[in-house]
Structure formats: structure tokens, C-alpha cells
Amino acid sequence: MDVIPLAGMLFVLLVILVITGAVLTYPLFRRLGQALDVYLEERKKGALPASDARQLEELIRGLHVRLESLEDRQRFVERLVDERTPELPESHHEPGS
């Protein structure tokens, strides 16, 4: 069997598949591009989608709660250190002497 006719048939089949794929996916990619343009325009204006704004608000509230908790813990540790640390007398001699 000769390979040349088989290669020609495979090439024609490949070209047909590529053209058909492009024709079928063109409307999908065009709509996707339009949606992306709209999204980028909204983002340039500074408008966030409602779901993103809610997620951001929840994240900020969570961070605020954690920060307050850390502040309370820091105050507690500082109070414990102040209570347990005796006052050391100041030395007037030079170190290393």
C-alpha cells in the first residue's frame, strides 16, 4: 500500500477538522471575549461584583476579629510580664570591667 494517498487523506481530514472546529467555536469565543471586555471595563471603573464585595467584607471582618484577639492577648502577656518581672537595680559600672 502506498503511503502518499493515505497522507493526502489524513491531511485533508485534518484541514476539515480544523476549519469545522474554528467555525463551531468562533461564536463561543466571541461571546467569551465580549464578557471579558465587560468584566474588564467594570473593573476599571472600580465596581466589584456583589459576590466579590461580600467576600471581601467577610474577610475584613474576620481580620478585624483576629486583630482584636491578638491585641487582647498582647495586653494579657504584657500584664503578666510586668507583674512577674522584678525591678532590677541599675548598675553604674561599665560592662566588661
Image: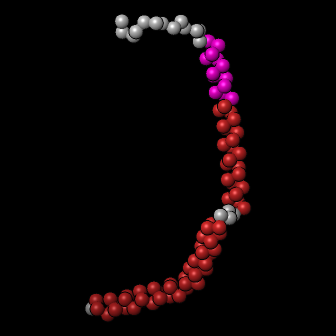
Taking depth in this image into account, of 22 and 59 the one nearest to the observer is 59
Say if the magenta span includes residue 83. Answer: yes
Which residue corresponds to the image point at 69% horizontal and 54% vertical from the top-left?
55
Give the quadrant of residue 38.
bottom right
Instruction: Pinpoint residue 31: horizontal percent, then vertical percent.
Output: 61, 80
Residue situated furthest left in the rendering? 2
Residue situated furthest front in the rendering? 92
Instruction: Pinpoint residue 51: horizontal percent, then vertical percent.
Output: 70, 60
Say if the magenta span includes residue 45. Answer: no
Taking depth in this image into account, of 27 and 65 the one nearest to the observer is 65
Instruction: Pinpoint residue 73: horizontal percent, then vertical percent.
Output: 66, 27
Is residue 64 visible to the viewer in this orientation of the structure?
yes
In this view, 10 is above or below 76: below
Give the quadrant of residue 69.
top right
Which residue corresponds to the image point at 50% horizontal and 85% vertical from the top-left?
22
Quadrant containing the C terminus in the rendered view: top left
The magenta segment: 72-84
Q: Is the magenta stretch mostly helix, strand or loop?
A: helix
- 21 vs 38, left or right, is left
In this view, 12 is above or below 56: below
Instruction: Pinpoint residue 65: horizontal percent, then vertical percent.
Output: 70, 39
- 7 vs 38, left or right, is left
Is residue 32 visible to the viewer in this orientation of the structure?
no
In this view, 69 is above or below 15: above
- 29 vs 91, left or right, is right
